[in-house]
């Protein structure tokens, strides 16, 4: 396994989706769901699933397919920096919401300080605000990486990720019609560390 930026994003999808999905087990029980219903526990759980599964998947896909789409590489250092800043600010935001929900913090109130029982957990709201600001600002790294890479990114090789699948045998960037000429497939798309091959991967079109 190579821990490139797309792989980190993909692992982020799995980790966050599993972690967030555990909250759904609690909400699936009516006895637990009744006190947690319409609290920040539900907000935290929902965003773990939606943001984790969707946005980290989008980040992974764009970074991975960017060279095939545009013929240039996205910056790996900026990609990894964006991943770590995003996940290390995302988890504190929405995990802390689970704790607020268990403390009885309901949704859709403009001033939680109106409720005396929430005074002791107000520091969590402040903490979430700072973490959310970092989460928001880190997305500008992603935006800059895309725009800069479109015009100044390193020229991409035909198969920069050393992927086995046939889509990476198409020219980069991909022309109309995708493949210049028909190809013959000799291998499966998952042949890594083949004993008779020196490299740890081999294309499907290679005998």
Image (tube, rainbow, N blue to C red):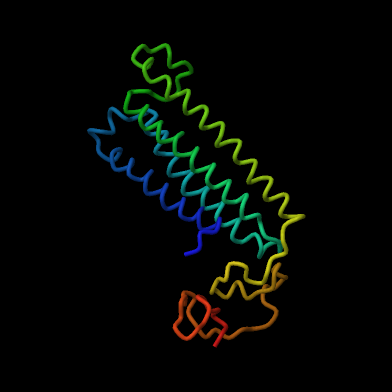
Does 5 sit above or below residue 112?
below
The picture places residue 184, in percent across and down from the top left corner, at 58, 86
Does 191 sit above or below residue 81?
below
Tell which residue pokes out farthest to the right in this image: 151
Does 45 sit above or below residue 12?
above
- For the residue pair 49 and 154, the one nearer the viewer reads as 154
Left or right: 172, with 116 as reference point: right
**In the image, what residue occupies the spot 59% across and 40% down?**
138
- For the residue pair 35 and 87, the one nearer the viewer reads as 87
- For the residue pair 34 and 145, the one nearer the viewer reads as 145
**In the image, what residue occupies the spot 54% across and 42% down?**
85
The picture places residue 21, in percent across and down from the top left corner, at 36, 45
The picture places residue 94, in percent across and down from the top left corner, at 43, 35
**In the image, what residue occupies the spot 46% across and 77% down?**
193
Image quarter where the C terminus lies is bottom right
Left or right: 205, with 91 as reference point: right
């Amino acid at each position: 396994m190579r821990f490139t930026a797309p792989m980190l994003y993909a692992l982020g999808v799995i980790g966050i989706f599993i972690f967030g999905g555990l909250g759904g087990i609690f909400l699936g029980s009516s006895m637990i769901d009744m006190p947690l219903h319409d609290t920040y526990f539900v907000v935290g759980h929902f965003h773990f699933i939606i943001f984790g599964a969707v946005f980290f998947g989008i980040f992974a896909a764009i970074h991975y397919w960017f060279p095939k789409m545009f013929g240039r590489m996205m910056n790996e250092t900026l990609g990894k920096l964006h991943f770590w800043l995003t996940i290390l600010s995302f988890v504190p935001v929405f995990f802390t919401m689970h704790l607020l929900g268990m403390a009885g913090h309901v949704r859709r109130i403009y001033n939680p300080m109106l409720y005396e029982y929430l005074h002791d957990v107000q520091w969590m709201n402040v903490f979430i605000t700072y973490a959310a600001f970092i989460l928001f600002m880190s997305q500008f790294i992603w935006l800059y990486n895309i725009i800069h890479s479109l015009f100044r990114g390193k020229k991409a090789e035909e198969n920069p990720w050393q992927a086995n699948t046939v889509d990476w045998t198409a020219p980069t960037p991909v022309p109309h019609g995708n493949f210049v000429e028909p190809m013959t497939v000799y291998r499966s798309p998952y042949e890594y560390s083949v004993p008779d091959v020196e490299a740890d991967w081999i294309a499907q079109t290679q005998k």
